[in-house]
Image: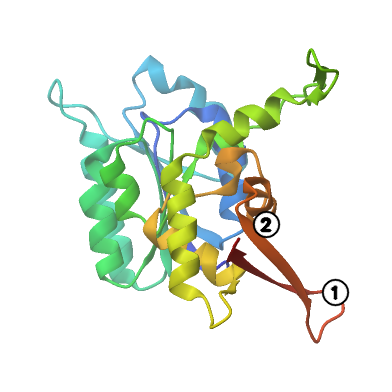
Amino acid sequence: MEISKDLRIALLIDAENVPHSSLKGMLEELAKYGTPTFKRIYADWTKPAVTGWKSVLLENAITPIQQYSYTTGKNSSDNAMIIDAMDILYTGKVDGFCIVSSDSDFTRLATRLREAGMKVIGMGEKKTPSAFISSCEKFIYIEILKPKPATVKATNDIRGKKITPSLTDTLNKIDNEIIKSITTSINDLADEDGWAFLGELGNLILKKHPDFDPRNYGFNKMLPLIKSLKKFQVDERKSGNSNIKLVYVRIK
């Protein structure tokens, strides 16, 4: 997804489906994509389960929307959030939406907003149903927004070689589906010599997998992830700007 700090974004949070401890990370992440001009959070604030949110709303200028649960088993907050999203859409004052929830109830909303030409970013926990993830242009797991723990020191195996557990675990998480998607995407974009521009490669993979993010596998950027797989060749070429290199990738 193209990053533009000038993008006007409506931030809508389902307080009953995400933890308040992730708010700082979510706001910092959203700042990469644009400026939130609407910031609203929805819940039945009489419930003890959302008490933790109250302490962080004022300092982040987020407007709480009260919605009582009139019927047991029904989430009235979801309905209020959907209605507000459509009202904001028709004002024409935003370029996109960020829907923060781990609930599949917002699948149709995200789809409808994209049909109207809006950019839709989703944020939620890894338990989020795939239907909602797929309906977003970009989906970010809030688990990767938490501060990283201290680096684990490497240990020696029986042959005396150093093993870094964090890297080993990370590479095991990169499943065959992602590797296959990278491979087929390179083939889709490659020139006559088999080279594909890394920026275009990342955008195409994101279209196929909205929840794709190198940070899911322990890498801050796409390039280190590609290099770690040992299945692809990387060519860093000079550009007109001495501070910028153009990175191309092809299958070995």
Dot 1 crowding, Cα within 10 Å, few <14, some 14–19, many 20+? few
Considering every residue shown, the one lying at the far bottom of the view is: 240
Residue 6, numbered label: none
The answer to whether residue 6 is visible is no
Q: Report the Cα–Cα distance between label 1 and label 2.
A: 17 Å
Q: Which residue is mark 2?
A: 223
Q: Nearer the viewer, residue 38 or 19?
A: 19
Could you tell me which residue is drawn at 69 percent across and 32 percent down?
A: 167
Q: Nearer the viewer, residue 94 or 69?
A: 94
Q: Nearer the viewer, residue 57 or 165?
A: 165
Q: Earlier in the sequence, mark 1 or mark 2?
A: 2
Amino acid type of the residue that numbered disc 2 sits on in the rendered structure: Leu
Q: Position of residue 29 (x, y in %)?
A: 59, 49
Q: Position of residue 108 (x, y in %)?
A: 20, 52
- Looking at the image, residue 195 sits to the left or right of residue 106; the answer is right
Amino acid type of the residue that numbered disc 1 sits on in the rendered structure: Asn
- Looking at the image, residue 23 sits to the left or right of residue 125; the answer is right
Could you tell me which residue is drawn at 34 percent across and 21 percent down?
A: 46
CB within 8 Å, label 1 to label 2: no
Q: Is residue 197 above or below residue 26?
A: below
Q: Quadrant of residue 191?
A: bottom right
Could you tell me which residue is drawn at 33 percent across and 70 percent down?
A: 91
Q: Which residue is mark 1?
A: 243
